Image (spheres, rainbow, N blue to C red):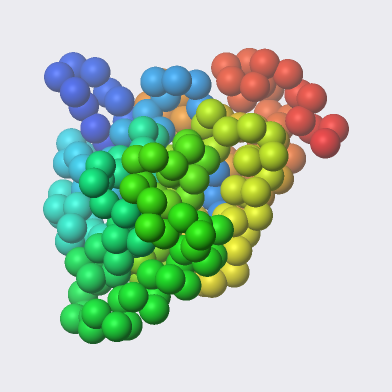
Amino acid sequence: MDILEGEKVTKFFGGLAAVYEVDFKIKQGEIVGLIGPNGAGKTTLFNLISGSLNTTGGEIRYRGKPISNLKPHQICKLGIARTFQSVKLFGNLTVFDHVFLGSICGTTSRTKTADAQIKSAALLELVGLSEKKSELGKNLPLAEQKRLEAARALATEPQMLLLDEVMAGLTATEVNAFTTLIHQIRSRGTTILLVEHVMQAIMAICDRILVLHHGVKLAEGLPQEIAKNPKVIEVYLGTDAYAER
């Protein structure tokens, strides 16, 4: 079953096509990677899916229903949550309150305070931040800020999670830990679409990969197919070394 699909999705900024007639389908339960050079249109596509930008043309459908040009809070409450390329935390909120806020405000149903507290504590346990719950989010190191943002997104009870470069700037050990977390999130029944430049992680965790270049879809396929694709190697990977891993 396709949980998310796009048909000829297009976004112009003036005369520049940031995304042009991109078709995609994501099945429920998949982990799909979105890769490409800087400026390829990856984050723009994320912004179109999440409602941060309006489409110029085409249509995005979630569970068969059009969501193009809905507001971000409407899309969130339908079941799509996201993180950001640059972490966006609330400066004076504790780690716990970040997740608690998502639990209270990000769902369609009214959540009792006690239930939101229980859910928030469980999510902090999932992302490994239980011991940091009383610290201000802004004071966490980068890897933990990214985990906190993921927990806040999960607090809205999404069926689909968009992760925008959550491993950028992390050490190899932190990347491995985040890869494990992504598998844990998927095991909860959440479909994942992620933008990422850490190719070892992308190749290891994704069921399929979609490649953008200059706003158009260059290729789509299994990780091993993408790693061997001559066009992808030429414009992005620069080597087929990943095909041997």
Query: From the viewer's perspective, is 208 left or right of 12?
Result: right
Task: Say which residue appears at 23% left-offset and 83% top-offset.
Answer: 112
Relative image position of residue 134 (x, y in whole percent): 38, 58
In the current view of this chain or complex, which residue is farthest to the right? Answer: 244
**What residue is at 42 percent from the left and 52 percent from the top?**
148
Q: Position of residue 111 (x, y in %)?
A: 23, 80
Residue 105 appears in the figure: yes
Q: From this view, report whether residue 54 is shown above or below residue 180.
A: above
* Left or right placement of residue 176 versus residue 56 in this view: right
Pick the residue in front: 158 or 154. 154
Q: Quadrant of residue 167?
A: top right
Residue 230 location in percent, x, y? Answer: 68, 22
Q: Is residue 10 left or right of residue 5?
A: left
Is residue 2 something that shows in the picture? no
Splitting the image into 4 quarters, where does residue 18 fall?
Answer: top left
Left or right: where does residue 127 sit relative to residue 6?
Answer: right
User: On screen, 123 above or below 199?
Assistant: below
Q: Is residue 66 above or below residue 103?
A: above
> Can you tell which quarter of the image residue 201 is in?
top right
- Image: 176 above or below 231: below
- What residue is rendered at 29% in x and 83% in y? 114
